[in-house]
Image (spheres, rainbow, N blue to C red):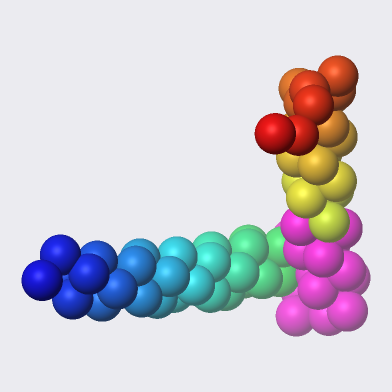
Amino acid sequence: MALQLIIPSVFGLFFLSGFSGLVLQVVWMREPSLLFGATAQAGAATLVAFFFVMAAGVGFRERRTEGMQPD
């Protein structure tokens, strides 16, 4: 019974996470277009910001887990 409730909940959370990521991507594509216009520079600025934040997150996580041993 509990598994029947957990699986749809997990799929729902994945759906909401993906949807919110898509909404944020659209917002971030529109904001630089106000600064640069609807050009490749706006798309490039969005991609640079995205990859920078991803790299910063990985670096933070790596430093935080340095020295930890797997179980």
Quadrant in the picture for the C terminus: top right
Q: At which x and y percent is residue 10?
A: 34, 67
Provide residue 63's location: percent of width, then percent of height: 84, 23
> On screen, 53 above or below 43?
above
Q: Is residue 8 left or right of residue 15?
A: left
Query: Quadrant location of the N terminus?
Result: bottom left
Q: Residue at the location (26% across, 76% down)?
A: 8
Instruction: Give the residue at x 75% y 40%.
Output: 57
Q: Residue at x 66, y 71 (%)?
A: 29
Query: In this orientation, which residue lies closer to the viewer: 44 or 60?
Result: 60
**Residue at 78 percent of width and 50 percent of height:** 54
- In-front residue for pair 12/30: 12
Image quadrant assignment for residue 44: bottom right
Residue 57 in view of the camera: yes
Does the magenta run of residues contain 49? yes
- The span shown in magenta is 35-50
